[in-house]
Amino acid sequence: MTAPDTESVSAARQPAWRTWRTQAPIVAMVALGGAIGATARYAVSLWWPAQPGGFPWATFWINVVGCAMIGVLMVIITEVRPAHRLVRPFVGTGVLGGFTTFSTYAVDTQHLVDSGHPSTGPAYLAATLIAALTAVWLATAATRRVLKRRQP
């Protein structure tokens, strides 16, 4: 068996290095944005804590507002003007992905059902889903309408 020559080994590693060099800024922006979004979400949850067995209003509104903001962002960066390649990962995936919390939504639903609130859990489950999807749709439509009026 012969050892591979160093040129072929370095050539094989080069594409992975190039991939990392192009992906590293994206990963960094997602991480930074996620930290900002998660911190904002945590601040809202401290400001507006859920009562045991009560409807988790803070998480509900965080998800609805976050989804609306995603709708606005996507219209602006895909239909209005091209954004820098790091805007979408930073704001969309990072900040708004860190801000919205569908894992907490699922856990809250399970806790409501398990703690003897069998009607509040499914109501929260359905209301959040409907409100979040409606928020994206309305924000997208409203943003398009506002931008269309501003055009000469």
Image (cartoon, rainbow, N blue to C red):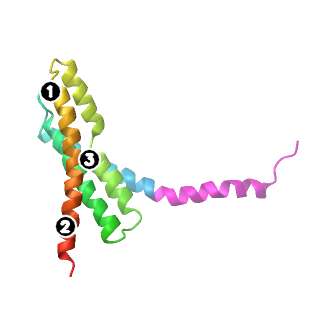
Foreground label between 3 and 1: 1
Q: Quadrant of the C terminus?
A: bottom left
33 shown above or below 109? below
- Amino acid carrying label 2: it is Arg
Nearer the N terminus, badge 1 or badge 2?
Answer: 1
88 shown above or below 67? below
Residue 50: quarter of image: top left
Q: Position of residue 110 (x, y in %)?
A: 25, 25
Q: Residues within 10 Å of mark 3 (few under 14, many from 20)?
A: many
Identify the residue position indicated by label 2 in the image.
145
Number of numbered callouts drawn? 3
Identify the residue position indicated by label 1 in the image.
120
Q: Position of residue 87 (x, y in %)?
A: 36, 62
Foreground label between 3 and 2: 2
State if disc 2 and disc 1 touch (CB < 8 Å).
no
> Which residue occupies 61% across, 54% down?
16
Identify the residue position indicated by label 3 in the image.
99
Nearer the N terminus, badge 3 or badge 1?
Answer: 3
> Which residue occupies 32% across, 68% down?
79
Any part of residue 92 in sight: yes
Q: Give left or right: position of 97 versus 137.
A: right
- Amino acid carrying label 3: it is Phe
Q: Position of residue 102 (x, y in %)?
A: 28, 38
> Which residue occupies 14% across, 24% down?
119
